């Protein structure tokens, strides 16, 4: 029996979640976002399973080339665009689409001779203030892209919401209004909706939606979990009990003695730690699923181990499976207990974890 933690990835759940996106945005095409190793789930395997997606989006060119090397032929969009003009022939040779979000990229397209044309998505900053051209630049950029010989005459327009997961915030409606005013009267295809907007802002769905987190069965909202939106968790992270020990009332556990037994109890040590990607800052009391019940983290997370309070009458045995997150225990709860977000937990899983695909 291996002591390595296991990340079991349920490809059937992944496909279910894509179907749910289709139900939520029935008239939109789906640009499935697979950046950061498909949110820690495995870039190539996830892409191979999402056969019903219309296109894929990644952040960087190396991710796109990995997909092409694996035989993925669907359209791929570089969300950060290209970094330098020397990459443009690589994009063309691999049939990659690029976002354009600054003057340097536009100038490179205008000045670089290419033996073909690239499909471009023009990104407009409507309030995120991260990537994208300013609204006052839109007319100029739009005209120059249409005139550029390196660009296919089918420009797509996009923006990104900063607060779509905050339903009481007025900023999403403001960004929508800015975007719609800018592009009024144009027939270009558009993309606005991320995972939160797919769930909560149907007026933003337009021609393309960009699901990321919800494809993996996870809620983008702080007050819900994926199951509340009829999503199915895709990843199940588990490990094993490697030792049991008795502690007496008042005894302290782990580095710094940050957990103290309030009564005599049994502790279990589980073979997972921050060296595997389990969050270092998970608090005492963070739940772990073991033998049909929740037990609580007791003491600081170590590099290779965590300790849980099994209770004074524990019947658990060495080798029993412990679920860190998955269908039995929502990852959103673990993220909250660690003062972070599910995105970070998924992206922090290390190569020590054994991936299994079902």
Image (cartoon, grey):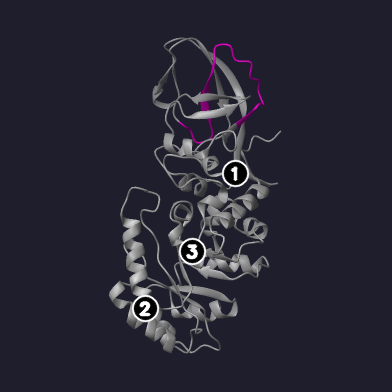
Residues packed near mark 3 inside 10 Å, few (<14), some (14 to 19) or many (20 plus)? some
Identify the residue position indicated by label 3 in the image: 59
Examine the rendered structure and indicate whether residue 330 appears above or below residue 115: above
Q: Quadrant of residue 138?
A: bottom left
Q: Nearer the viewer, residue 93 or 120?
A: 120
Residues packed near mark 2 inside 10 Å, few (<14), some (14 to 19) or many (20 plus)? some
Q: Is residue 130 visible?
A: no
**22 with respect to 332 (left or right):** right
**Mark 2–mark 3 distance (CA, rounded to whole Å):** 18 Å
- Which quadrant: the N terminus? top right
Examine the rendered structure and indicate whether residue 1 appears above or below residue 133: above
Identify the residue position indicated by label 2 in the image: 104
Q: Which mark is residue 232?
A: 1
User: Which segment did they paint magenta?
Assistant: 301-322
- Residue 182 location (% of width, % of height): 34, 73
Marks 2 and 1: which is nearer the front? 1
Q: For mark 2, give the secondary structure.
A: helix
Q: For mark 3, give the secondary structure.
A: loop
- Residue 235 location (% of width, % of height): 60, 44
Number of numbered discs on residues: 3
Q: Quadrant of residue 108?
A: bottom left
Q: Is residue 116 visible?
A: yes
Q: Is residue 315 magenta?
A: yes
Q: Quick one: which residue is furthest to the left in this view?
A: 136
Residues packed near mark 1 inside 10 Å, few (<14), some (14 to 19) or many (20 plus)? many
Q: For mark 1, give the secondary structure.
A: loop
Mark 3 near mark 1, Cβ–Cβ under 8 Å?
no
Q: Is residue 14 magenta?
A: no
Examine the rendered structure and indicate whether residue 209 appears above or below residue 123: above
């Amino acid at each position: 029996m291996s002591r390595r933690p296991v990340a079991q990835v349920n490809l059937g759940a992944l496909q279910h979640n894509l179907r749910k996106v289709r139900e939520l945005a029935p008239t939109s095409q789906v640009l499935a976002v697979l950046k950061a190793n498909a949110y820690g789930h495995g870039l190539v395997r996830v892409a191979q399973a999402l056969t019903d997606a219309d296109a894929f989006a990644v952040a960087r060119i190396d991710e796109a080339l990995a997909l092409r090397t694996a035989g993925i032929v669907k359209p791929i969009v570089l969300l950060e665009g290209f970094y330098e003009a020397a990459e443009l022939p690589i994009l063309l040779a691999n049939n990659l689409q690029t976002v354009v979000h600054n003057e340097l990229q536009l100038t490179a397209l205008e000045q670089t001779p290419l033996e073909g044309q690239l499909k471009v998505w023009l990104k407009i900053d409507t309030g995120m203030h991260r990537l994208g051209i300013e609204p006052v630049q839109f007319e100029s950029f739009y005209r120059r892209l249409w005139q550029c010989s390196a660009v296919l005459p089918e420009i797509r327009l996009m923006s990104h919401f900063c607060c779509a997961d905050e339903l009481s915030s007025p900023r999403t409606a403001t960004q929508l209004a800015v975007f719609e005013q800018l592009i009024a009267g144009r027939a270009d295809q558009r993309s606005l909706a991320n995972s939160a907007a797919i769930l909560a802002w149907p007026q933003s769905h337009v021609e393309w939606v960009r699901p990321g987190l919800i494809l993996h069965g996870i809620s983008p909202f702080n007050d819900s979990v994926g199951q509340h939106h009829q999503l199915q968790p895709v990843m199940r992270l588990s490990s094993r009990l490697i030792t049991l020990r008795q502690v007496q009332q008042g005894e302290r556990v782990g580095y710094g003695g940050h957990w103290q037994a309030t009564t005599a109890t049994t502790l279990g040590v589980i073979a997972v730690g921050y060296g595997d990607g389990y969050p270092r800052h998970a608090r005492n009391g963070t739940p772990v699923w073991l033998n049909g019940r929740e037990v609580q983290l007791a003491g600081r997370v170590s590099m290779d181990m965590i300790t849980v309070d099994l209770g004074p009458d524990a019947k658990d045995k060495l080798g029993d499976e412990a679920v860190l997150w998955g269908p039995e225990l929502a990852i959103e709860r673990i993220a909250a207990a660690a003062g972070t977000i599910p995105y970070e937990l998924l992206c922090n899983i290390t190569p020590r974890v054994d991936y299994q695909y079902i």
